[in-house]
Image (spheres, helix red, strand yellow):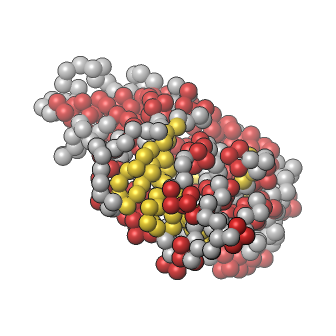
Amino acid sequence: MTASPQIPADAPGTAPATAAADTLMTAATADASADAAAATSGLPLLHWVELDQARSAPWRSEAGVPPPKRVQVADERLPPEVAYKLICEGTALLWRGDYHRAKDLLQALAVRVDGKKAAAGKPGGPGAGKSGGKPGAGGKGAPAGKAKAQAAAQGASAKANVPASAAAAASAAASAPGASGAALNPATQAFHLERQARGRRARLLNMLLLPVDTGHRIDLRRAPDVSEACEEAWGPSTGPCVVSLRELLGLIGAHEWRKAGIEVTQLGNGARIHAHYGVFSPVRNEYLSLIAKAPLPKPLLAKLQHPGPEEGGEPLPADQAPRAFDIGTGTGVIAALLAHRGVPRVVATDLNERALACARENVERLGGTEAIHVVKADLFPAAEEGLADLIVCNPPWVPARPSSALELAVYDPDSAMLRGFLAGLAARLAPGGQGWLILSDLAEHLGLRSRDELLAWIRDAGLRVAGRLDIRPRHPRVNDQADPLHAARAAEVTSLWQLEAGLVWEGAEPKAG
């Protein structure tokens, strides 16, 4: 095993004592402050040695990654190739130099990480298969199905440009007892390998660390004021901490997106939605076009057209008043769109505190507080809210385990939210009401969930499909042939499933409208 490079205190790459002393409190004061901050925030402590003193500070990681065990203080004198070797060997770099030079180093590290990844996928490279398509590629005596599965794993790794270790793991899984060719769909394999590659990339690049002082200040040369961005994501400062530069840059980017907002044309009048840090932003919003044009359920339309007292009619009883639920509201954009379509009461639910705060802020900004009520709930609102004429849910589309809380809007382990929505829908629908399920079929093209499974869940929940509207995605990755998941993305369709209570089925599934 190669030893980690050791850098003397006066060698390039180690922050000079005078510069470090200018930006640090005394060791005793710093440790006391770190302990207090950790106790207040509940964060784990990161430990390192600096100026021959043992140091510590609370460690922040949205992904829940534990603090690195080995930390070395560094600045711009550290050559990128040495920095790359250190992070590959598990040594994190605590930056004490110029802020913009830290960003330069992060970019240089990314080039090296991506370069190694690309090399692993080249034919004949570390990640390439050696079989060349010859008979018996699965090894002597290997069943033909497993040989094909191994070949599929190796081919997927080449397309995904993943590290050799990931390809080896996939090939090992293919040859494991009980493995079958059917279980290793090439698209599924490409998906998992691509996630492994992205995970490794994130793990390495997150090893460049920045100190954040009390008040969410960065005491480095040419460092920007990030206090507002940090407070939006983390809340009020509880003292100093350490965070990866890559995560901090993501936080700053989210802050800029939040300030600018995203125009939602379906709401009209230039209305914008402002996504908070950690809340899924409707950048890809073709599904909103489906919600905007789908015909409202007939009972809901009848209630909306019911003459009120000002027109000589009688008001509807409270339990029959028109209402809709938005399950898993996120930014509140679907609730806002339902109110825009004339629904006088929309109950928007979510469990995530960031999403609840985000939805409430957007509802207030859009002037929808009379119609939209944002409540904390696991899927459906409390029974006191009664039944709804329309219940809309846009669950995470990919049934896989998220690597952090930030991915909960994308990945739905075991399709738990999807199945929970379907299982509870019939009991919360008013007579003649509909549930609108917004779902992409990307998971089907990736071999992660079948159409038959989805239809079975709908039937088992006592529901029938009354109709379906489809739309093709318009995001740039659809045409990116370099994307390892290009084939699945190019075939993807997003659908609005119109579901009603009842078990009367007309064929396997309706044609799209």
Residue 336: % across, % down = 67, 58
Q: In this view, does 509 lie above or below 461?
A: above
Residue 39: % across, % down = 65, 80
Which of 326 and 321 lies nearest the eye of the viewer?
321
Q: Give the residue drawn at x 29%, y 54%.
A: 504
Tell whether 414 sits left or right of 435. left
Residue 493: % across, % down = 47, 37
- Number of numbered discs overlaid on the protein picture: 0
Which of 439 and 308 lies nearest the eye of the viewer?
308
Q: Give the residue drawn at x 46%, y 61%.
A: 433
Q: Can residue 12 be seen in this view?
A: no
Residue 131: % across, % down = 28, 23
Residue furthest left as drawn = 141
Q: Give the residue drawn at x 50%, y 50%.
A: 438
Which of 466 and 100 lies nearest the eye of the viewer?
466
> What quarter of the picture does the N terminus occupy?
top left
Tell whether 172 sits left or right of 376. left
Residue furthest front as drawn = 312
Q: Can residue 513 be seen in this view?
A: yes
Q: Give the residue drawn at x 30%, y 19%.
A: 132
